[in-house]
């Protein structure tokens, strides 16, 4: 159906009532259409997003249009700050990294030549009140030290205040532990860091194949039971009995002992369980899948650093239920 066009007088300017009413210009994209594009483009490949727009709205658009508007709004949506929840007595929080595919352009005149493909760690942090179900998320491609600043903001969005206790759970990597102390303090009465039980079990599982090859599952079950009772020293002594000879390799028994001995102050599993707090970082690892990887690691997707960072902001804002606020507050202003 052809668009109705009018003229103001015989030689006056052309008037396009529909375009004026819909607030769109020639070859332009209305606000509702942009929202639909970003909605689809934030979850699907840009090609699949165009197909969904065609299916649901009957509008044929170029992939470049979907890509442009999705990335433009992804870069702007980071300005939305998650509104703090009610003050929490205890905040449960975690930080973890996962790899996403990154492409870097060449340095010559033709940027298409000399491209390099690689992987970059995306640091994802989450936090929630102890009694809450949903987490607040934040993510960045920056270093763990920089991610620590986001970690603090995410915890505040979950209700962190000066009187709040903090329960952190992560794999115990030095940068993560240092970031936790920098952002939440070193007072163990207020900010307690717990070494992820799964990572400890993984190291013990590797040692079990050396110590008890015929009954490695039973042996591992016994050691995990001791850890849950905070009998860390007993497990360490058991490992010491079975130390491998020193050599250039990375022996699993010595490796498990070193991993646990270095972090034994952060293995109060009995205390955490008694307080109803998690001893594993499954929440943030699950977040990697549905917040980051579901979009940024789809087949055939490679990202520039700038666009990947923008998509991380888009994905975390949606996960934090701030999507409507962006379109009603920031876009209209």
Image (spheres, helix red, strand yellow):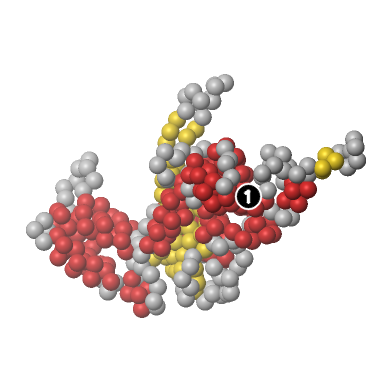
Between 136 and 302, the residue placed more toward the observer is 302
Report the front residue among 331 and 198.
331
Residue 286 x/y as whole percent: 40, 59
Q: Residue at x 44, y 61 (%)?
A: 94
| Label 1 crowd (10 A; few <14 / some 14-19 / many >=20) | some
Residue 112, how many percent across, how many down?
Answer: 51, 25
Q: Is residue 176 left or right of residue 14?
A: left
Q: Residue at x 23, y 71 (%)?
A: 225
The secondary structure type at the circle numbered 1 is helix
**Looking at the figure, which quarter contains the C terminus?**
bottom right
Toward the top, the furthest residue is: 109
For the point 15% across and 55% down, the residue is 209
Q: Is residue 113 among the parts visible in the rendering?
A: yes
- Report the front residue among 203 and 69: 69
Q: Is residue 226 above or below residue 205?
A: below
Is residue 71 something that shows in the picture? no
Direction front: furthest residue: 1
Q: Quadrant of the N terminus?
A: top right
> Which residue position is annotated with label 1?
33
Residue projecting furthest to the bottom: 274
Using the image as rendered, state which of residue 157 and residue 238 is in the foreground.
157
Percent position of residue 169, x then y: 41, 64
Q: Position of residue 89 (x, y in %)?
A: 52, 76
Disc tally is 1
Residue drawn 37% across the image and 62% down it: 282
């Amino acid at each position: 159906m052809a668009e109705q066009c009018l003229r103001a007088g015989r030689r006056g300017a052309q008037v396009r009532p529909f375009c004026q009413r819909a607030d769109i210009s020639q070859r332009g994209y209305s606000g509702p259409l942009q929202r639909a594009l970003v909605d689809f483009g934030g979850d699907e490949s840009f090609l699949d997003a165009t197909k969904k727009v065609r299916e649901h709205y009957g509008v044929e658009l170029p992939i470049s249009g979907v890509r442009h508007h999705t990335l433009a709004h992804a870069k702007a949506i980071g300005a939305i700050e998650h509104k703090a929840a009610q003050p929490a007595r205890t905040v449960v929080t975690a930080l973890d990294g996962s790899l996403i595919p990154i492409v870097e352009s060449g340095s010559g005149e033709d940027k298409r030549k000399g491209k390099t493909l690689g992987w970059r760690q995306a640091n994802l942090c989450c936090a929630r009140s102890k009694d809450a179900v949903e987490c607040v998320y934040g993510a960045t491609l920056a270093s763990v030290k920089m991610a620590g600043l986001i970690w603090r903001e995410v915890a505040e969005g979950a209700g962190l205040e000066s009187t709040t206790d903090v329960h952190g759970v992560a794999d115990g990597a030095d940068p993560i532990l240092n970031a936790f102390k920098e952002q939440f303090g070193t007072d163990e009465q207020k900010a307690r860091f717990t070494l992820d039980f799964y990572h400890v079990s993984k190291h013990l599982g590797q040692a079990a194949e050396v110590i008890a090859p015929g009954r490695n599952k039973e042996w591992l079950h016994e050691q995990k039971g001791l850890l849950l009772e905070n009998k860390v020293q007993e497990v360490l002594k058991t490992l010491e009995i079975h130390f491998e000879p020193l050599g250039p390799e990375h022996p699993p028994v010595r490796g498990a002992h070193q991993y646990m001995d270095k972090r034994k102050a952060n293995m109060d599993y009995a205390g955490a369980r008694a307080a109803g707090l998690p001893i594993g970082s499954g929440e943030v690892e699950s977040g990697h899948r549905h917040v980051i990887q579901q979009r940024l690691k789809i087949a055939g997707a490679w990202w520039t650093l700038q666009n990947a960072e923008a998509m991380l902001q888009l994905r975390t804002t949606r996960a934090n239920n701030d999507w409507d606020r962006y379109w009603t507050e920031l876009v209209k202003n």
